[in-house]
């Protein structure tokens, strides 16, 4: 079993930066691909970014490419999402999730992820 706890959200002005952290319990976390998703009010939860278990491969949704960077430190059982040049449309609750399947492919569908955190609010003011 893996438990995930997000932190680092907050209120920031447009153009600012935030770094989200996803801290995990469980010895097997370092074997899992991990993704970040977000959900704005009235919208479905959407994929933002994901990293392979090693951190060597990553995927991003087009709207955050060049602004967000996902990384992980398996020694600390933590995955990060560095968010720069934030825009009001980035406002959402951000969730991290872990895919417990041992695969080469990094998934972007929320249905493929097994463990979820409680979320952290990110609000970007204009």
Image (tube, rainbow, N blue to C red):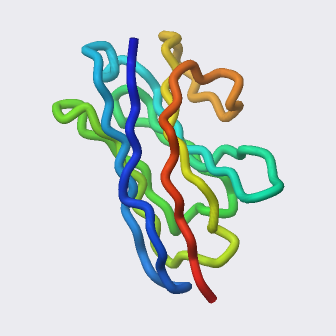
Counting the numbered discs, the total is 0
Residue 61 placement, left or right of 12: right
User: Residue at point 55% right, 51% down?
Assistant: 94
Residue at the farthest left position: 75
Q: What residue is at 37 percent from the left and 52 percent from the top?
A: 7
- Quarter of the figure with the N terminus: top left
User: Which residue reaches farthest right?
Assistant: 42
Q: Is residue 83 above or below residue 93?
A: below
On the rendered image, what quadrant is the C terminus found in? bottom right
Q: Is 58 located above or below residue 14 in the figure? A: above
Q: Position of residue 64 (x, y in %)?
A: 60, 62
To which quarter of the image does residue 72 belong?
top left
Q: Is residue 50 left or right of residue 77?
A: right
Report the residue at 40% width, 68% height from top: 18
Where residue 69 sits: x, y (%)?
A: 44, 57
**Residue at position x 42%, y 54% from top?**
81
Q: Is residue 37 above or below residue 63?
A: above
Q: Percent x, y for residue 87? A: 61, 77
The foreground one among 79 and 124 is: 124
Residue 102 placed where, x, y %? Answer: 48, 10
Residue in the foreground of this view, choosing between 35 and 61: 35
């Amino acid at each position: 079993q893996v438990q995930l706890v997000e932190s680092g959200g907050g209120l920031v002005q447009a153009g600012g930066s935030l770094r989200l952290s996803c801290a995990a319990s469980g010895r097997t976390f370092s074997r899992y691909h991990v993704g970040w998703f977000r959900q704005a009010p009235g919208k479905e939860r959407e994929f933002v970014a994901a990293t392979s278990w090693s951190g060597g491969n990553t995927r991003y949704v087009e709207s955050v490419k060049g602004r967000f960077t996902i990384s992980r430190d398996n020694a600390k059982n933590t995955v990060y999402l560095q968010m720069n040049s934030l825009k009001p449309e980035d406002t959402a609750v951000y969730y991290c999730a872990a895919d417990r399947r041992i695969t080469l492919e990094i998934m972007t569908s929320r249905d493929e992820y097994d463990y979820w955190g409680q979320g952290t609010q990110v609000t970007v003011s204009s």
